[in-house]
Structures are given as C-alpha cells and as structure tokens.
Amino acid sequence: MKQKNCLIFGGSGQIGRNLIRKLTKNNYIVTVVTRNIHQKSYIIKTQANAGYINIVEANIFDEKKIRDLFKTSDVCINLIGILFEKKGGNTFKNIHTIFPSLLAKLCKEYKIKHFVHLSALGINEAIDSDYAKSKLEGENNILKNFPLATILRPSVVYSSDDNFSTNFMTLLNRLPFFPLYYNGKTKFAPIHCSDLTDIIYNIISKNLYSKIIECSGPEIFTFKELIEKLLKLIDKKRILLPLPLPVAELTARLFEIMPKPLLTRDQLKLLKYDNIPSGKYKTNSDIGIPSLRYFENEVKKYCYMWRDGGQFSTEKYKTE
C-alpha cells in the first residue's frame, strides 16, 4: 500500500500530538507546520519514529511557502484555533476565517484527497460571540472553496494534556469556592482526545466524506455536574457559587488582563449555549465511529496529581 502524506497545521497541541502518533503508527508520513521550530520541534519530533515525521517552520499566512507543501501531500488537517484574542496578536478572523479559507483554496488547486478542519460545537446558536461567528464564517468559506472538505465540530476535548479538566482541577484545588456561570446549567458532551483522533484517522483511512460532523462523547453533563465530578475525583469539597451575570462580566473583564485569561467576556457569552449535538448534522456515531471513553473513567487516570498525597492518596495506599 502506498504511503499517504498528511500535512498537519497545529500539530503541537494535545490533539495534534495524539493524531501524529496514531497516523505514523499506521504508516502515514506526516509533515507538521509550526511557527516556532525552536520551541515546538522537541515536542513534535518525539511523537513518531525517525523517517515518519517532517517539521517545517513557516508563517501560516506565507502562502508561497505553505503552497510548496501541498505539492507532495494527500491529506490536509487543520487543528489551529485560538480561545481568546491577544492585543497585538492574531485575531479570531485571521485564524478561524481567513486561514482556513486559504487552505481550502490550496486543497482544491492541488486536488488534495481529504481536507479535515476542526471547528466547534454550538457555533450556529452563539450569534453574539466573536469566536463563534469567526468559526462559522470559516466553515462557510471552506465549503464554498472545497466542497469535499470534512468539518468536525467537537464538544470540549479533554485528556491529561488539556486546558479543560486540568485547569478546573487546579482551580478547585486552590479556591475555597467555585463560580457557576448561568447557574451551571449549560450542557456539555465532553469527548476524549483519543476518541476525536480516532474519528479523524477513520475519516481519512476509510475515505469517509461528510460536510459537517458533530463530535461528542458518550455522556452529557451540565457544567455543575462536571464540576461536582471533578471535586469527587480530587476528593475536595468546595462551595459552588452561582454568579449574577453583571458580576460574571466584571470578573471576565478582570481576567482578560492576564496573559492567559481564565475567562473572557466572549467565552462568557459562549457559556450561555449548550455544547451538545444539535440534531441538525451527522454525529460521529452516525458515521460508525462512536466515542468509547467515559469522562470519569479517563480523568480518574490522572486526577491523583490534584489530590492531597498525589498518587499515594488512592485507596490502594491508604492505611488504617
């Protein structure tokens, strides 16, 4: 079987690293584009055996340089996204709208077999969020320029390397109380990183084509239920405090001053909307790739890092 060449943008994140390992173990040659090879290459090159991975340093908007990479590629996968805008940095529009449109045009020009683009659940409803609007506009531009593209809309993605469960467990470990926005009623269907990369791998290996696929885990929780599960896993008791919207907006405004804000006003708007399959599009289960990993079972594997006593806090090590 001829080896396929995969071109990946955003390969140094939790999803990218997991995907690189999965693809290279299955005889795919992977080219990863990074904007800073000195910072990221040591992470990326350890994800595969020598000969299976190429790392290219490039500005993602340098069309001339990235164009050359499409000449030898069969598959293009875009995992790049940002959760907040930095002053003087990249904008939602640049990253979520303009860049994916450029990739779609190049995929069409070079007759790429698959273009898989990672978007997000709930963006149709979140019309007051700049993040959601930029994601939706990017999707529309992709399908206009390259109708064969497959757009994945995952719920929150979690793993031991995430910015979701690990951040919450850190906060729950340190704070005497935890704020509940919108009374903690927003629903999520968290999907494990390995389940999401299984979906991507199956799409490109089995030549599955479907314009938009909503990707979710096997369970649905409210935000409050998620926090309660994490508290149970790290063996902590905290006051869960519903915050009035004006107070929540004020705290978000203060958090935005931080280099890596815990919450922004735009993210607060997103929290109004459920992050679960809408029923309007196919899901990963509909295309024969159901999620297999359950939230509590997976987080249990690494939550000991936030328990008093660490790994020795488990029942196995407790003494009378």
Image (tube, rainbow, N blue to C red):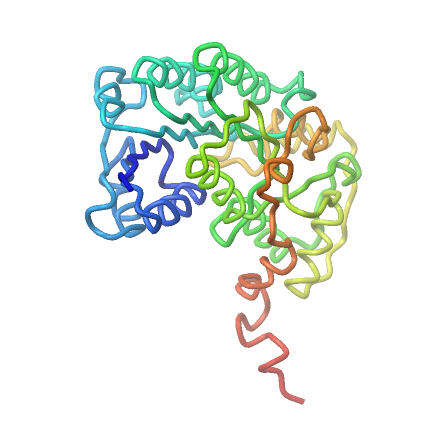
Q: In this view, does 137 lie to the left or right of 123?
A: left
Q: Position of residue 86 (x, y in %)?
A: 45, 25
Q: Residue at x 42, y 47 (%)?
A: 18
Report x, y in % for residue 160: 50, 54
Q: Which residue lies furthest to the bottom in this view?
A: 320
Residue lying at the far front of the rendered structure: 1
Please say if 237 is above or below 220: below
Name the residue nearer the viewer: 314 or 50.
50
Q: Against 142, is 255 above or below? A: below
Quarter of the image with the N terminus is top left
Residue 41, x across and y down, in percent: 25, 43
Residue drawn at x 37%, y 13% as measured from the top left: 105
The foreground one among 118 and 164 is 118
Q: Is residue 157 left or right of residue 180?
A: left
Q: In which quarter of the image is the C terminus?
A: bottom right
Residue drawn at point x = 70 percent, y = 24 percent: 280
The quadrant holding residue 223 is: top right
Look at the picture and state if 128 lies above or below 156: above
Q: Is residue 305 left or right of residue 78?
A: right
Image location (x, y in percent) of residue 226 = 70, 49
Towards the viewer: 112 or 12: 112
